Each structure stands twice: as structure tokens, then as C-alpha cells.
Image (cartoon, rainbow, N blue to C red):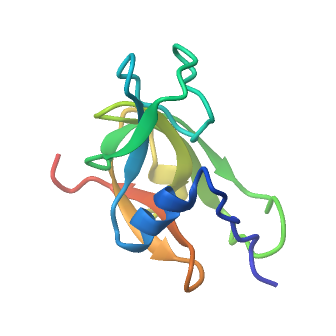
């Protein structure tokens, strides 16, 4: 069985289109400047409905991590490192850290976004240890 596939909505379709092109974009409020994730109808900082997707460097730091040993559902390969990543240019994303032993992922580790196609329509942003530093 394959893992669940995200279903784009009107709110998220631009995020998924950018991911298919290997670009990470984040909502940024036009009124207060807050960058946030996940996309919401209104800015969680000031409740403005005026925001746009803006490019992100895709680099950040692992804020928190857990190694998952029991699959949350069909199609997940375990173990995997699930991390909250504080992005350098704002927002925090929850994602898998891949490309290394899950037990080696640590708080404070520098990571970079790495896109992996799940289907022809959905490409997921994962993170890998940052080899740049």
C-alpha cells in the first residue's frame, strides 16, 4: 500500500506547484510581514487575509526531532526522523529528515530542503543534512 497523498486545495495549489518545480515557497503576510506555515486563510499574526507565497532558501535548523519506529499508516517506511525545522527566512515546517541515519538527526543540525516526487502531481519537501554548513 502507498502512503497517503496530500490533496491540493485552492489555498495550497501554488505551494504544490512550486514544490513540483523544486522550489519552496512560504506564505508571507503583506501587512505585518510574518512568514508562516501551514497556509491559512488569514495570517496567524495579525489576521490579515492579505498574503502571498514568497520563495524560501529552504535552509534551516532542526528545532526538535523524534525518530518514529511505528508507521503512522500504510506506506510509511520506518524508522524515520520527523523534525520541526526552523527555516532561516521564517516559519517552521514539520517534515522528514532523510539522507542520513534517523538516529543521527539532532537538535541544532543544519538542513536543506530536498524535494521528492510522491506522484506525478505531488512532490514533497523533505530535508537533508546541510553539507554547506
Q: Residue 130: image x %, image y %?
A: 26, 53
Q: Residue 14: image x %, image y %?
A: 48, 59
Rendered-image quadrant of the N terminus: bottom right
Q: Identify which residue is drawn at 55% across, 51% down.
A: 95
On screen, residue 117 above or below 132: below
On screen, residue 127 above or below 133: below
Q: Residue 4: image x %, image y %?
A: 76, 70
Snapshot quadrant of residue 10: bottom right
Camera sees residue 23: yes
Q: Identify which residue is drawn at 67% across, 58% down.
A: 9
Query: Which one is nearer the viewer's eye here, 40 or 62?
Result: 40
Query: Which one is nearer the viewer's eye here, 45 or 81?
Result: 45
Q: Identify which residue is drawn at 38% across, 50% down.
A: 25
Q: What count of labels does the image hold? A: 0
Camera sees residue 84: no
Q: Residue furthest left?
A: 132
As drawn, is 101 to the left or to the right of 111? right
Q: Residue furthest front?
A: 50
Snapshot quadrant of residue 49: top right
On screen, residue 117 above or below 19: below
Amino acid at each position: 500500500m502507498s502512503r497517503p497523498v496530500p490533496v491540493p486545495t485552492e489555498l495550497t495549489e501554488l505551494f504544490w506547484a512550486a514544490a513540483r518545480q523544486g522550489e519552496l515557497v512560504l506564505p508571507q503576510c503583506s501587512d505585518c510581514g510574518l512568514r508562516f506555515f501551514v497556509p491559512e486563510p488569514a495570517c496567524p499574526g495579525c489576521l490579515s487575509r492579505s498574503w502571498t507565497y514568497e520563495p524560501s532558501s529552504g535552509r534551516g535548523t532542526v528545532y526538535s526531532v523524534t525518530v518514529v519506529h511505528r508507521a503512522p499508516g500504510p506506506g510509511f517506511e520506518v524508522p524515520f526522523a520527523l523534525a520541526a525545522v526552523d527555516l532561516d527566512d521564517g516559519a517552521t515546517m514539520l517534515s522528514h529528515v532523510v539522507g542520513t541515519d534517523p538516529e543521527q538527526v539532532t537538535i541544532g543540525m543544519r538542513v536543506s530542503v530536498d524535494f521528492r516526487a510522491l506522484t506525478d502531481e505531488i512532490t514533497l519537501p523533505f530535508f537533508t543534512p546541510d553539507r554547506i554548513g
